[in-house]
Amino acid sequence: MDMQDVAKEVEENIEYQIDKLEFLCSESVEENKIFLSDHLNLLNPNKKSIKNQVYTDSILNAMASLIDYYCIYCFIKIGIREEKITKIQYRPINNKYLIKAREQNKKTDLKVDELQEFFHKRITDHTNLKPGEIDINDYWICFFGDAISCVLYEVGLVNERNNALNYDAANNKFIIEKNVAKYFYYMNFLFCNRYSNSGVRYNIYVDINNCLKHNVVPHLAPKVESFNGEVRMYSYFKLKNSDSIFLKDGILKSIVKADFEILKSDFSRKSNNPSSPPLQCTLENELGLGPIITLDPQNGYLSKDQETIYFFIDTILIAKNRDATLVDANNSLLDILRTLIREIRRGVHLDV
């Protein structure tokens, strides 16, 4: 089988998923307006909108499929053999995987915050250079090399589960395994770890989709708020505290399980003590992704009745009360889908 033909077919399927997403989003926007308007005008305020729910569920599913298709496409471009295609699995390269890869390759028990210090020691031992003297592109490819090579080894795209720091002193550059470099350039926008967290925004919605697909429905919930006299309407995925048992370990589960009172207290300190770098709260420390939570500097983090807190995790609006976690199912989701589509189209046309 000609793998170039297969790649072309997968590329066409990627465009189909994008077209489907754009159609579903367009339809969902209109249904969501009706859903929120009925709630605002007290027309069937407790009635669930099946049509709006179906569109939104379908958006989540199409988004997850788009990421899976793109992952397959990238592996084909890297050079996977046809008999290994069914073994391809999307991995967000999270903290847990970074540690697992390091321990597997170096037999070293490290915490995620220690990985960079350990890496700097490896650089010095191999090259006698300071980290700041290394080309930034080489630096990050080498840093993630162990984790990437573990992913590629599983499908036969590298021969070893490590990324030895081979350094060409004469030309002042690293000799990097080409497939490791290709994977980095194609997939790094989906990474979800302490050192590269641009994939957090996508993975939160992927987690919601996995919950929907395998366990329970995160039903849409309308919410109306007033900020400085301006009425705003929101549509959220609602995950009750008890729903945490249906979630796999990860970012979303940590958010759902987070204690309301502790978050409220942490956000009070964040709001009253702006600093650089930002003060990290209990949830951020648990997630291990750095200072990834932001608060609205204009409208604050607390509702007027003080029963709901609002915050952003990597541009996603989240609301939380004592009983449930609400994840924005409208503007945040639509903005993130635009970014995802742009990144995937860039990756499809990237030639490395």
Image (tube, grey):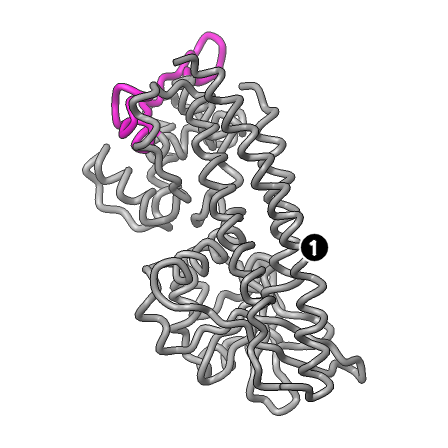
Dominant secondary structure (helix, strand or loop) of the stretch shown in magenta:
loop
Q: Is residue 283 above or below residue 223?
A: above
The quadrant in which residue 241 appears is bottom left
Q: Decide if residue 130 is in sight here.
A: no
Q: Is residue 349 above or below residue 94?
A: above
Is 257 included in the stretch rendered in magenta?
no
Q: Which residues are magenta?
A: 149-175
Please give the name of the residue rendered at 43% of the width and 68% of the height, measured from the top-left corner. Answer: 217
Q: Residue furthest bottom?
A: 305
Please give the name of the residue rendered at 46% of the width and 69% of the height, measured from the top-left corner. Answer: 218
The quadrant in which residue 273 appears is bottom right
Q: Amino acid at mark 1?
A: Ser
Is 167 included in the stretch rendered in magenta?
yes
Q: Is residue 237 left or right of residue 169?
A: right
Label 1 crowd (10 A; few <14 / some 14-19 / many >=20):
few
Please give the name of the residue rendered at 57% of the width and 29% of the height, measured from the top-left corner. Answer: 12
Q: Is residue 210 left or right of residue 47?
A: left
- Find disc 1 in the rendering and name its residue: 26
Q: How many marks?
A: 1
Q: Residue furthest right?
A: 229
Viewer-closest of 81 and 308:
81
Q: Residue furthest left?
A: 107
The quadrant in which residue 68 appears is top left
Viewer-closest of 56 and 317:
56
Q: Position of residue 286 (x, y in %)?
A: 38, 64
* Secondary structure type for disc 1: helix
